[in-house]
Amino acid sequence: MLSKCANPECSSSFLYFHEGKLFRSETSSAPAGDDASPDTGMKKTARRIEFFWLCANCAPKMTLIKSGDGIAVQPAVRAQAAGL
């Protein structure tokens, strides 16, 4: 459940979906248990979906990236700075 901004330096509480920016992250882990799919005989991988939120103050300046097993906050790169 979302409770606060994903930026660790921000203490804004999550209240509404229309404020800020919502991020969805899907991860897959090692095969779940010893259960094999009856159709293919292959083991299934467990998928996990997590949601992260940046508040209206942080969203224009920050973005989220996958970092190892988790999520990290980093400054957003503007299109002008990227030469686009």
Image (cartoon, rainbow, N blue to C red):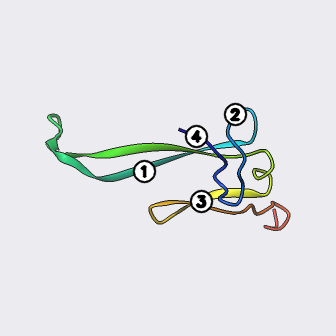
Q: Position of residue 31 (x, y in %)?
A: 24, 51
Q: Which amino acid lies under the numbered mark 2 shown in the image of this protein?
A: Leu
Q: Position of residue 21 (x, y in %)?
A: 70, 43
Q: Position of residue 71 (x, y in %)?
A: 55, 58
Name the residue located 46 percent from the left edge and 42 percent from the top edge.
Answer: 49
Task: Give residue 62's quadrant in the image.
Answer: bottom right
Q: Which amino acid lies under the numbered mark 3 shown in the image of this protein?
A: Ile
The residue that label 3 is drawn on is: 65
Outermost residue, right side: 80
Q: Secondary structure under badge 2?
A: loop
Label annotation for residue 42 = none
Q: Earlier in the sequence, mark 3 or mark 2?
A: 2
Q: Earlier in the sequence, mark 4 or mark 1?
A: 4
Q: Earlier in the sequence, mark 4 or mark 3?
A: 4
Name the residue located 76 percent from the left edge and 37 percent from the top edge.
Answer: 19
Structural distance between the alpha carbons of marks 3 and 2:
23 Å
Q: Quadrant of the C terminus?
A: bottom right
Q: Which amino acid lies under the numbered mark 4 shown in the image of this protein?
A: Leu
Q: Secondary structure under badge 1?
A: strand
The residue that label 4 is drawn on is: 2
Q: Callout 4 environment at 10 Å: few (<14), some (14 to 19), or many (20+)?
A: few
The residue that label 2 is drawn on is: 15
Structural distance between the alpha carbons of marks 2 and 4:
9 Å
Q: Earlier in the sequence, mark 2 or mark 1?
A: 2
Name the residue located 76 percent from the left edge and 53 percent from the top edge.
Answer: 58
